[in-house]
Image (cartoon, helix red, strand yellow):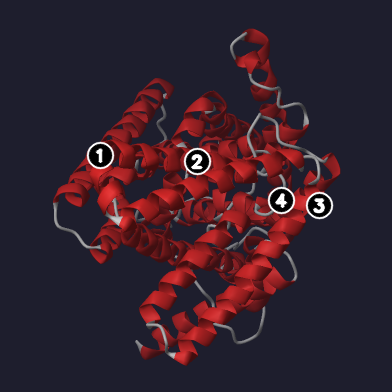
Amino acid sequence: MHEQLLLILGLLLIVMMLVMLAQRIKIAYPIFLVLAGLGISLIPGVPVLKLDPEIIFLIFLPPLLYDAAWYTSWNAFWKWKRTIGLMAFGLVFLTSIVVAFASQALMPGFTLAMGFLLGGIVSPPDAVAATTVLKGLKVPKRTITMLEGESLINDASSLIVFRFALAAVMTGVFSMQEAAGQFFLVAGMGIVVGIVGAHIFYLIHKFLPTTPAIDAALTVMTPYILFLVAEHFHFSGVMAVVSGGLFMSFRSHEIFKTGTTRVNMTGVWNTLIFVMNALVFVLIGLALPDIIDGLGETSLIDGIKYGLIISLIIILVRLLWIYPVAHIPRWLSKRIRQDPSPGWKNPLIIGWAGMRGVVSLATALSIPVMMNEESAFPHRNLIIFITFIVIFVTLVFQGLTLPLIIKLTKIGEIDNILPSHEQQAGIQIRLDNLAINRLNEKYTSDLQSNSLVENLKHSIENDIKLNKSHLSSLEMCSNRQDDLKEYHKIMLDIFAMQRKELFTMKREKHFSDDEIRKAESQLDLNELKITGNKYL
């Protein structure tokens, strides 16, 4: 027990060091962690790590999906639902079909049912990899929304394809009509479970006397309970978590009313998701020796060849699918043409961002070892190895070249979206005007008799003037990006000096540590307005 705990802690420490190194050399940490895990696994004497698919599905998948759903804009998701649906469902099904027929023709003894099994495994891109690679790069908001929206539900569609293909291999019987009906039942009932479960947790948060710590703990429990309940009834746990996460995020302002609760929850979830993301990518690399040992009668060269061909197929299918999806509906609908055209650059970036990840590997590993008591599952080890090659090629090759493509295409914002600073100033002006109206309507007598309330009104009025002046300045330098960058640089430098001053105050002991921490938290929030970082 002590040795296992030491191994886990050692792995966590290594992962943290690798992430810091990835930041230093400016490589997206999912790519670097896979390469580092692969390198570590080749060192003689390193324990061989076996990935348990149950751990991936039960421990990692629910919170990762829930976090993605929580930070997804429902309005943006709904606006681009057509494209997201065609990618998350249509592209998954098309990829599965093409991979099924290609693998049947390519690999000796590979049946069509096994091909669909492989297609269901390698069809869903990984959201974390794409968004992490794109972080800090200038890409349109529409691109991020579509990639995040696709990733929310493509795991569900691919896992359902995998489930039916696995049943077909095991039983030798497959009915397209029955499979289509079961698909809608499994996905639809998963959504129902998610919405019902989210309503229950909504009532708990809103009407029971919870504390910030209890609220944070309940939010961690929510995705696991939704996932397990749905899977218990053989419905889609992925759809349950996603639908529940979207509902809870949309109603979060009603149930998490204090700043303490929200800040506490953010800290808990940022740490949890970062650690999980980092671990799953290094585990992919560490799993290679065990995967190679299981190849058996298939040669390593043949396995690599098959993996590279399947990788090329899924990359081409995605690129060929995304352009018709982006443009054909515009030709058919005048309403859709009202939105700015995505051109050729945006579909290219979305198409090239189809990197596969840990869900594909965990799905492959979940294939049973035995068909029955007498015969082994055919080509199981080859399917797992091909999945690893696909993950490696798409994650490393596409991940490393994606920033270069973005730089070469010089893509700009597609939709008419106000810059972040203008939106923040506009929001604050509306909130301040609301506060002034509230004071004038409800607290007229206090304004006359209470100097603190009167000072509050003057402070808010000054804030309105400052924000209006700030907006005017932004309009004047909207075409002078250097001015804005210099302004951000100055603000960050001031924040750094203020932090040092707070440390000096702490040593002088003139102010309490609690008040200094509050001031430091406000500085952090002000800095986030500029940097915009949610977590690594």
Residue type pointed to by label 2:
Ile
Q: Are marks 3 and 2 in contact (CB under 8 Å)?
A: no
- Amino acid type, callout 4: Leu
Q: Earlier in the sequence, mark 2 or mark 1?
A: 2
Q: Is residue 41 visible?
A: no
Of tags 4 and 1, the one toward the viewer is 1
Residue lying furthest front in this view?
448
Mark 3 or 2, nearer chain start? 2
Frontmost residue, 436 versus 117: 436
Label located before the other in sequence (4 or 3): 4
> What kind of element bears circle 1?
helix
Q: Which residue is mark 3?
A: 482
Residue 188 left/right relative to 388: left
Residue at 31 percent of width and 49 percent of height? 227
> Mark 4 or 1 closer to N-term?
4
Q: Which residue is mark 2?
A: 429
Q: Which residue is mark 4?
A: 137
Residue 442, numbered label: 1
